[in-house]
Every structure is written in C-alpha cells, then in structure tokens.
Amino acid sequence: MNSQYYEFFCPVKVIAGHAALEHIPYELTGLGGSRPMIITDSRVRQAGLLSPLLTACQEGGLEVVTIYDEVPPDSSTAVVRDIARVYREQDCNAILAVGGGSSIDTGKAVNILVSEGGEDLTQYSGAGILQKPLRPFVVIPTTAGTGSEVTSVAVITDEHKEVKLPFTSSFLLPDAAVIDPRMTLTLPPMITAATGMDALTHAIEAITGLGSNPLSNAYATAAIRMISQHLIAVMDHPRNTEGRLALAQAATMAGIAFSNSMVGLVHSLGHATGAICHLPHGLCMSLYLPYVLEYNLDRIRGPLGELLLPLEGAEVYATTRANERAEASIRAIRKLRDQLHERCDLPRTLHETGRVRRDQLDDIARLALDDGSILFNPREVTLNDTQAILQRAWT
Amino acid sequence: MPHQRLPLRFRLRRLYVTVMFAVMGRALQALSEVDRQSRREITALPHGFVFELTVMPDGPGLAVEHTGNGHLVYHRQPAGPVDLSIRFKHISHAFRVVAFQEKTAVSFASERMVVDGNIAFAVRLTRVINRMETFILPRALAKRAVKEYPSDLPITEKATTAARIYLRILTHPAGTPRTQ
Ligand SMILES: [Fe+2]
C-alpha cells in the first residue's frame, strides 16, 4: 500500500556474544551507575547464573550493592514497593534485572518508583505518564523468549484489586540488554522449547499482523531463520553455546519486531488461556500458532508464503510452488511442534496439556475477545471464530 | 483560534472531521438504543464510563458516556474526567479515517493514534464503532472503514437498523455540530 505509515523505535543498546557479561561494568559506569542493585528470581540464583555476573562485576571494579532474588512469577505492586525500599536504604543508583519476563518487568516498575519517588506504583499506570528518563537500567535475559528486554511495557499485578496494571512508556526501555550464552545454557528442555515457540510467534505475528512494517519485518525474518536453524539442535545438545546464543539473539530480534508492530490473535488466545488455566505463555503460543495462521490464511497468504524461506531453507522454498508456500509454512510449524513433542513432550493440543477442561473453552473464547492484541489481527475476530479455533486446537 | 488563519482547504477539512465526529457520536448513542448486540458489548463498561475520541491537541472530538444497561449518551465534550481516550496525533490522520481513506484498525495499528485507558474496554468500543459503521454506511464505504464486513448481516437488518439510527440522529435535540 503506497499510503503506508509506520513508526519504529528501539533505543536499547544490545550487547551480545561471548563474554558479554564482562562488558557490564564498563557500560554501567558509563551511564553513571556505580552502585547497582540486582533484581532477580530464585530460579536464576539456584541455577548459579549470578556467579559469572558477580565475578564479572567484581573484576571490573563495580560493586554490586545488594541482590533481591525473590521476584515471584507474577510480580505485584507490593513486591515492587519492597524492592524500591531496599534500593533506597542501600543508596543504590542503578538496576540490573536478571531473569525472564517477571524479573524484567519488576525491574522496570522498580525503576519508576526509585526515579519518580513515592510508594504508590498505581499512579504511574497507563500510557505516557512518565515524562523523563529513569535511572540507569541494564537487563540480562535468561529465557530466550519474552523479548521484554526491548519492550516499553511492564505488567504488574495490583496487590489490592488482583488486576494486572499495564505501564507503557519509552522511558521503561532499558539502556542496554546483555545477551550472554552462559545465561541460557542451563535452561530446561521444556522451557527452551516453549520460550523458543514464543519468540517464533512474536516474529510471525509481527510479519502477518496489521502493524507489519519493513523494519520490523527485517528483524522478524532474521529471528525466524535463527530459530528454525537452531531450536532443534539446542534441544538435542543443550550445552551448544552457539545455538543458545543464536536463540537468545533471535528472541531479542523478535522482541524488537513485535514491540514495533505488535502481536495478534495467537497472543489474545494465549493471554486468555494463561489467565484461566494458568498454562505457561510460551506453551500457549505453540498450541495456537498453526490454527490461527490457518484461520487468517486468506489475508496473510503472501507474507506467510515468503516465510517458507527462513523456516525451511532455500531448497524447500524453491521446489514449492508459489501458491502453495503459505500452506507449506504452516506445515513447517507443525513439524517443528512435532519435533519438540518428541524431545520434551511439549503438548500440541489443549487436550494434551491435561490442564484445560473442555467446559473452559467458552470462557477462553470470550476473554480472548477483550485482549488488546486482537486489534492487530488481520481478520475481524468474532466469538464464533475464537470458539471454532479452540475446538480445532482441542485435539 | 489559530486555525482560522489556515488556508480554506484545511479549514474545510477540520469542519468535515468535526461534523463526522458529531454524526458518529450521535450514531453511537442511537445504536445503543436500537441494537441489542451492541448493548451486550457496552454493558461490560462501568456505569458512568466516559470514552472520548479526539484529535490532538485540542479537538475536534466526541465523547460518549455509559449511562447503564448498555446505553450510551453522546456529549460534544466530556463534562468530567475521561476513563478511556483515543487521540489522533494530528487532524490529517483523523481525516483519513473519517473520509474512509484508511481503516480505523490500520490507523490504530500504524500508531496514528494514542490510546490511554483500559485496553479491554478499548477493544469493546472498537467493535461497537465498527458495528455502527457497518450499519450506517453504504456497504461499499463500510468495507473501506472496517477490517471485515460481516458475512452474516442480513440486508434487511442492516436497512432497518440504519433507518432507525438515522431517524434518531436527525431527531435528537442534543444540539448542532460545533463549527469554528
Ligand atoms: Fe509472547
């Protein structure tokens, strides 16, 4: 369309590769962060992921003032307030968030409180409330998937009302994202598979959604190629450093893509399923991706067909007729799901999860219609549509 | 108003957007009175919920208030605090949408507008606005306004509902569209 308009923004410095952690003292000092606080969760601590980071800081002459390692999977305003209190008591002046989506979102929210002052996080909820840059903030993702290290959003549960509060501002973006293969080397197979599928979904929905644009598409296509080439290899050889680094970079690239073009119906259904059945987000993505692509097929045939190249490589792409490539892309995604199922029992249907009851499908179908990402889906989704997709995803 | 010094073309464009917003606001109120499906969507909004669709920095715009049981009441300007606002970043973006040069969904997806408030409610109101457009616009225009023209909307339902909405827009005493 010649009247296309889009915006693309990603001011996060990406520090990636071998010994990336060792660059943190230099980066943080350059930002004026001489007294960092680490915000992380118990899984990260138990997996021993902090020790290379602490050593790197110590060797680089950077004193880590304090460590908060009890971020829960669903972080709340109470947790954020507690962490902010420790930050102030210890006179910190920078934040290092280490972990998955929850630790990173908590880091963003703590940064709001310690920069803007006060105890009440709720007053900053919404879009565009923040007006100025926050404290130096560096993120170290440990689950190659969510892409939170490059998004301007944080979601925190309100401790009183049990609702999820969204915070949106470009000032929430970290100053730097550090991608070091050591941080994802010990990720268990199931989480590796699920977060890999989450990243793949980010990239595919970014390209096939209404917000798709040339810059996002470039990042998304590259992410799809890297995931297709490395995900199964990493499942077979978990300590494959090259593969782990590729998956982590792919997740960040997919994050850059979807934070600029948004996601669609796979995420609407996934958010609803997560809320009702408490299934992990990445697993939900894997469950719905092929069915939603089939549902959208007529609207996305062109871009989806082109994805056959990064999904399956030049040979398959060249030998598949142009008008059959979109279906072949969906087959490639199904094949990937089968391969993951063989290796770690990643469920492929709602029934296989064993955690979804058939009588919950209607609630999921209705809740999905309230999800913001549905606005970016290429087709106008009705209740009949979500119900039909859930039926197909059941077995 | 600084707009008065703009060339005539731009003043007319502003006037067109102003009139279209007024029509849309009244049509939303009328739709909530005649269409049960829309009322079902709107009922989920809190009583007294105010939604505003406007243009940065100072209008034109429209506001509707949920007065209970799925009924919306149109205001030219919100009287009190707004719960959900969707603001076009510039009058030219709003014009593209109300002149059916760009679908509302595409305008939103390409960040020509800013949403502030509960997204779930924004999604609902978007569906209601789409439904309003499918009713009051001729099919060819509606197809350019909404993502997907409903395949299951009987032509008789469209015609009778449209007639009832237009009747209400024309007979409502809620004042005339604001002009510069
Ligand atoms: Fe996701």
Image (cartoon, rainbow, N blue to C red):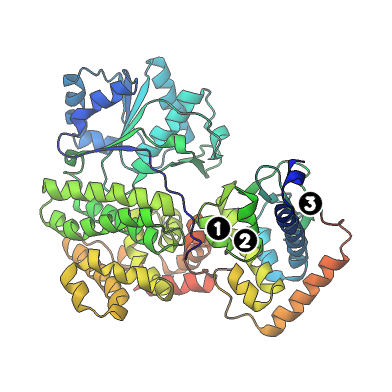
Q: Amino acid at mark 2?
A: Val
Residue A321, relative to residue B170: is it above or below? below
- Given the image, what chain letter belongs to the residue carrying mark 2? B
Residue position for label 1: B107
Q: What residue does disc 2 label? A: B97
Q: Name the N-terminal-most of marks 1 and 3.
A: 3
Snapshot quadrant of residue A49: top left
Report how far apart the C-alphas of labels 2 and 1 lie in the structure. Answer: 7 Å
Same chain letter for marks 2 and 1 = yes
Residue occupied by mark 3: B76
Q: Quadrant of residue A18?
A: top left
Is label 2 in contact with label 1 (beta carbons under 8 Å)? yes
Tell me if B76 is positioned left or right of A206 in this view.
right
- CA–CA distance in space, label 1 to label 3: 23 Å
At mark 2, the secondary structure is helix
Q: Position of residue B117 (x, y in %)?
A: 60, 46
Who's the residue at 40% across and 70% down the image?
A: A300
Q: Nearer the viewer, mark 2 or mark 3?
A: 2
x%, y% of residue A205?
38, 60
